[in-house]
Image: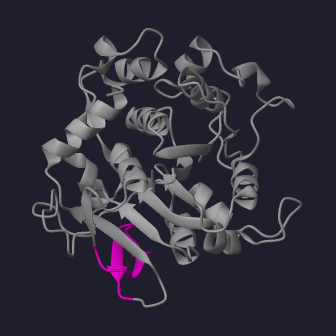
Amino acid sequence: MNTPVKIIFDTDIGWDCDDAGALAMLHRLCDKGEAELLAVTHCMANPWLAGCIDAINRFYGREVPVGINYEVQKPEDKGVYAGALCEGFPNRYPAETWGTDKAAPDTLTVLRRTLAEAEDGSVTLVVTGNLWSMARLAVSGPDEISPMTGKEMIARKLARTVLMGGRFFESWPMPIYAAIQPIGDPSTWEWNIYGSGLETARTAFDNWCGELVLSSFEIGTYIVTMQGYPSRAAAGDPVALAYELHNKGTGRNSWDHTAMLEAIRPGVYWNYHANGRIWVDENLVTHWKPDETCRHTYLLPKADYEDIRQVIDDLVDGK
């Protein structure tokens, strides 16, 4: 039997439902022995986000470290479903713990502690939100947790990082919007890059010294999953409520699911572009360039979209 892939999941869960779906799928893959969940961190912070994450983890029978990024606070924003899940399901971080010593720790603390305790080259980091957590880790210095810098941790502890983000018009063989929108137009931004801001995005990419695989906007757009999930989910499933509140269970593009699937089953469903360096231009559009010193790449089509959709739906349904 293959060794389970050790996962740290950094997410912007609480607004778009595909983050919740990806976390559900991760738990199902843990149940199958294909993955081991080490920690879940958020790239932002408000009183409901840690509880939202913990509620889903607890529903699937796991209690792992949870972190939120206090450097990017949205204290009055309950999100689309973060407040409902935090307030409606058992968890360790109800909103009243915000600002107390019982609140969730900072994301950077959880990332550095989890990586410091891990064996070298053993962890896969999955990122499905803005790049704030990545950037903070990349430029972090030695501290009481570890004498290693963030760049040293990335190089030593991570096997690879899979990021849902970016768009690649130059070489993408099946463009979605490029045919009708000029490259560089603001409408060509991908949200996880755009929302990070230029400085943060460049800090993350320029300082990421390990293997980095981007599951770009194009990958998940064609694959709509979890249609009707609230009606077939088990009673008390917080992910079902997330999908109900987001779009009444009509399904969602699988941007985050596809990143998670690639992280745990690498190379099974997608091909890879050549290794090089990912960079971000002034319009916040991602590009690839040759660079023998970097192992940055992005996914390209291989398996049939319908086959991937069925795999994701079956996993989330526990089949």
Region rendered in magenta: 273-290
Q: Is residue 165 visible?
A: yes
Question: Does residue 262 belong to the magenta stretch?
Answer: no
Residue shown at 84% from the left, 70% from the top: 147
User: Does 121 appear above or below 58?
Assistant: below
Question: Does residue 278 belong to the magenta stretch?
Answer: yes
Residue shown at 47% from the left, 36% from the top: 23
* Percent x, y of residue 281: 39, 75
* Percent x, y of residue 1: 45, 50
Q: Is residue 194 visible?
A: no
Horizontally, residue 312 falls left or right of residue 12, namely left
User: Does 113 appear above or below 89?
Assistant: below
Where, quadrant-wise, is the C terminus in this rendering? top left
User: Does 11 appear above or below 266?
Assistant: above
Q: Nearer the viewer, residue 194 or 57?
A: 57
Horizontally, residue 252 falls left or right of residue 34, namely left
Q: Quadrant of residue 74?
A: top right
* Percent x, y of residue 183: 22, 70
